[in-house]
Amino acid sequence: MLELVNVSKTFSGADGAVEAVKNVSLKIEKGDIFGIIGLSGAGKSTLVRCLNLLERPTGGKVLFKGVDLTTLSKKELLRTRRSISMIFQGFNLLEQRTALKNVCFPLEIAGVSKSKAKKRAAELLEIVGLSDRAGAYPSQLSGGQKQRVAIARALASDPEVLLCDEATSALDPNTTASILSLLAEINKTMGVTIVVITHEMKVVEQICNKVAVLDNGVVVETGEVREVFVSPKSETARNLILPGAKAAEFSSGGRVIRIVFDGHSSFEPVVSNLSLDCRTAVNILGADTKNIGGKAFGQMLLQLPNDSTASERVLRWLSDRGIPYDEEVKTDA
């Protein structure tokens, strides 16, 4: 559906050239909810704007259904962009227009008659759960309602792809959850491929099936969300999954390990059993685990005792029970 091939983007500034995106290659399949995650300044927003050529790459190719967008004329590109809609963190609604008329706006630009545009806009507002707010102006809507209007407007052109650039960052947790559920439903019922740009792993976990981890303009890891979550290969992914829980921050105590729960029973008290069986205490430095269908998925950072014999007992105990773990590299404070 969408593919980036060795895409780079360099900006020129007063202090010289800045490489925002560096030689990125990604493939987004039809029907995916694909997450692109990274910390602030990683190049996420630049990368997503390259997907529809709002930012023209300095190098590489952007393929949409096999066609390189960088080779299209301006007219051809504008036509193609109707199939690749976008929503933003700031909503970007027209304040002087009602919710209904905001959704009508792209249809009017496309030359759709007012009656047909109004009918289609009303249908889209119903899809996003805002039929009763059609006559409200943006100033009369909550943040979540504004984003629902923005989603309805983005769907007006019947896109095949929906790009979401930090679309939930300005929303509270409950509203974020409802917007993500709406996007998942749109993906399921309308078949729209969705690309989600975010700095929050919880957003990726909730709706994405695949994820790419971006660090300083470079994709450092990509794969199925579950695989990345239970066994991150990059330091960036580990920090996003367990933010702030780094082995380097702990100068006292024994070795630090990261154990992975990839389907053990949620009802099995792993840490308690470990301490009892090994006759030693461990320190929980951080954890992010979830109960999914009675199974535990996630990770936990444990600090082992100073005693090397006790530490080895713990590691053997984990290995004997098939619980994966990795040792964190620990540096002096």
Image: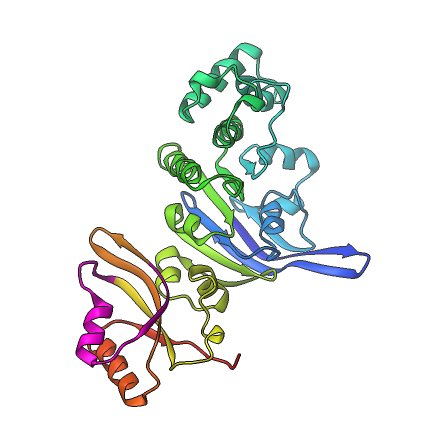
**12 in relation to 52, above or below:** below
Asked whether, in this view, residue 59 is left or right of residue 300, the answer is: right
Q: Which residue: 44% across, 65% down?
A: 238
Q: Specify how the rendered protein is coloured.
A: rainbow
On whether residue 271 falls in the magenta region, the answer is yes
Residue placed farthest to the top in the image?
115
Where does residue 34 sit, x and y in percent of width and height?
A: 45, 49
Toward the viewer: 105 or 71?
105
Is residue 28 at least partly visible in the picture?
no
Q: Which residue: 37% across, 35% down?
A: 185
On whether residue 324 falls in the magenta region, the answer is no
The mark tally for this picture is 0
Q: Quadrant of residue 18?
A: bottom right
**141 in relation to 76, above or below:** above
Where does residue 29 sit, x and y in percent of width and height?
A: 44, 48
Where does residue 60 sit, x and y in percent of width and height?
A: 63, 56
Is residue 170 at least partly visible in the picture?
yes
Where does residue 188 sit, x and y in percent of width and height?
A: 35, 37
Magenta range is 263-288
Q: Which residue: 55% across, 57% down?
A: 39
Asked whether, in this view, residue 19 is left or right of residue 282, the answer is: right
